[in-house]
Amino acid sequence: MSDSRNAPCTLEVALGSRSYPIHIGPGLLGDPRWLAPHLAGRQVMVVTNETVAPLYLSRLRQGLAADLEVRELVLPDGEATKTLASVERIWDALLAAGFNRRCTLIALGGGVIGDMVGFAAACYQRGVAFVQVPTTLLAQVDSSVGGKTGVNHPRGKNMIGAFWQPRVVLVDTDTLVTLPPRELSAGLAEVIKYGLIRDADFLAWLETEMDALRGLDPAALTRAIERSCTLKSQIVAEDETEQGVRALLNLGHTFGHAIEAHQGYGNWLHGEAVGTGMLMAAELSCRLGWLSDEEVARTRAIIEAAALPLAAPAEMSVEDFLAIMRLDKKNLDSRLRLILLRTLGEACIHDATPPETLAALLEAFPR
Ligand code: NAD
Ligand code: MG
């Protein structure tokens, strides 16, 4: 076989000495060429969960050479397992196996696994090599890029963590075949977000390709993931620790978090709440005179085409929204800070929305 078999699309995340490649395409999982160059030594631990293990663990193992010392750890599924206790299980397994500072942790799964394994790697023996193999669209376009790792605390989501960059990210688009459609749509919300905040051409491309993406066309998926990762990694390179421009990635998230918090985390998927939240941000941007009615209609149409919800929960009042949004950690000095759209493809941070304009939007928005 020639070397062009399954040649992936590759992009480089530029972070100086911690730069790393993201390989994207079908058929990458069982191919040793993409993993081997990034393993720190012979000791490798693959961490995954009970849902993903039967689907993809053996395929991943085919991509690991026979002379490696490979261990596996299969954790329970779900956001509720994203805890320090699970990370301790990873550390226990590493110590029990006698793994040293030259071991490599491989995260095989969605964002929950990626965040936990990255954090375990950041702390084990003060930091060991880590590889991301994201298997949800959300993890492929969002959580595996940017170096944020961590776990939840009973008092708050993602409250314990570290910045820790992977050695390589391997995105095998074939893994999306088994992903539940709601999870695919949730990932598409973040893809649409990149177009809205930073790339009008990409947004226009998404408008024409949404059916192909929902139909899991490999070429369309590869392009959408590549563009999303490029846009996120550019923003991260400009602002690795979230002092400024990285906040734009939160388009739709302040409204979305209010929906998630009010509904109880897990009832609405994060991406579903972000989809509705982006439409709320677009409508507010229109009320501020920045977006035209036609641009809001385009925003609504693409969110609908991704099979994301267009209405807020029926029982959520204006005061419910405001009470939760006031607690948002982006707020400074009690002024509500929102990410809004100057135009399609250009977001801004805005902390001067008149309270009556926000209240009117929340009142008028469909339930
Ligand atoms: P998830 O990891 O819970 O995965 C969603 C569901 O899909 C799970 O049940 C999982 O087992 C299953 N699954 C995964 N891959 C599958 C596949 N190929 N086929 C079938 N089922 C599959 O959720 P997620 O949406 O991937 O990630 C959400 C997490 O990511 C949250 O904890 C969030 O805080 C975190 N996150 C982190 C960042 C970051 O920058 N680090 C960014 C965004 C989100
Ligand atoms: Mg998000």
Image: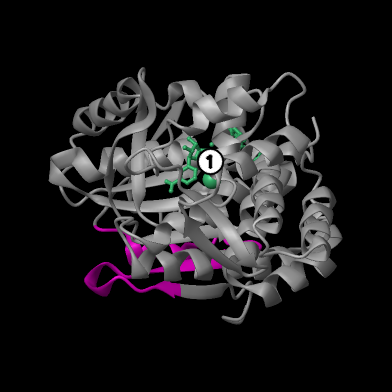
- Residue 58 in the image, given as x and y percentages of width and height: 55, 43
Who's the residue at 22% across and 49% down the image? Answer: 128
Residue 70 inside the magenta-drawn segment: no
Q: Is residue 13 within the magenta segment?
A: yes
Q: Is residue 24 above or below residue 322?
A: below
Classify 146 as above or below 110: below
* Label 1 C-beta lies within 8 Å of the nearest ligand 2 atom: no
| Residue 26 visible in image | yes
Residue drawn at (83%, 48%), measured in percent from left and top? 304
Tell me what residue is drawn at x 71 percent, y 68 percent.
203
Quadrant for the C terminus, please: top right
Three-letter residue code for mark 1: Thr
Residue 244 position within the rendered picture, expressed as x and y whole percent measured from the top left: 35, 61
Label 1: few (<14), some or many (≥20) within 10 Å? Answer: many
Using the image as rendered, state which of residue 302 and residue 3 is in the foreground: 302
- The x, y position of residue 262, in whole percent, is 59, 21
Q: Which portion, as a residue range, is magenta?
A: 12-40
Helix, strand or loop at disc 1?
helix
The reply to whether residue 25 is visible in this rendering is no
Residue drawn at the location 70% of the way across and 54% of the way down: 287
Using the rendered view, name the quadrant where residue 257 is placed: top right
Q: Is residue 32 above or below residue 339?
A: below
Q: Position of residue 362 (x, y in %)?
A: 68, 36
Colouring scheme, one of rainbow, by chain, secondary structure, one colour: one colour
* Left or right: 247, with 217 as reference point: left
Asked whether, in this view, residue 91 is left or right of residue 314, the answer is left
Tell me: 176 left or right of 333: right
Q: Quadrant of ligand 1?
A: top right
Name the residue beneath numbered marker 1. Answer: 254
Q: Quadrant of residue 282?
A: bottom right
